[in-house]
Amino acid sequence: MFKGFNLQYPEYEVVTPHTHKSFTVRSLSVSEEEKLKGSLMTPSKITEHLNKCLFNSMVKKPEDVNDYSSFLKLTTIKDRDAILYGLYHINMKK
């Protein structure tokens, strides 16, 4: 009996430059990419949308980062830039 597909997304580990925390991100699905590219938002909402996309793409994260608000509190902008670069890198390999 068919029980569905078991999808394995490529993963990429990023060690952040300021806090030296290790995050593993997975590549985005097609629907996540379309949502990210096709969203019409005000400039104030773009940052929030991008941060949520980063958080949702994380497969492994440090123990002290257990929800979205702790992610924002415990990472710097440069850390999030590094995670974004990791996400970009893994999606270019698809």
Image: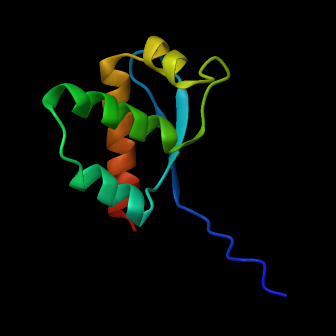
Work out whether 6 lies above or below 83: below
Q: Position of residue 11 (x, y in %)?
A: 53, 53
All told, the count of numbered labels is 0
Q: What residue is at 32 percent from the left and 50 percent from the top?
A: 88
Instruction: Give the left or right position of residue 88, taking residue 20 as reference.
Output: left
Position in image of residue 46 (x %, y %): 23, 34
Q: Which residue: 68% across, 22% down?
A: 63
Nearest the eye: 94 or 35:
35
x and y, in percent, of residue 28 in the image = 43, 56
In this rendered view, identify the residue nearer to me: 4 or 23. Answer: 4
For image coordinates 35% across by 52% down, the residue present is: 89
Residue sticking out furthest to the bottom: 1
Indicate the quadrant containing the N terminus: top left, top right, bottom left or bottom right: bottom right
Q: Position of residue 91 (x, y in %)?
A: 37, 58
- The image shows residue 22, relative to residue 85, as above or below, that is above
| Looking at the image, residue 22 lies above or below residue 92 | above
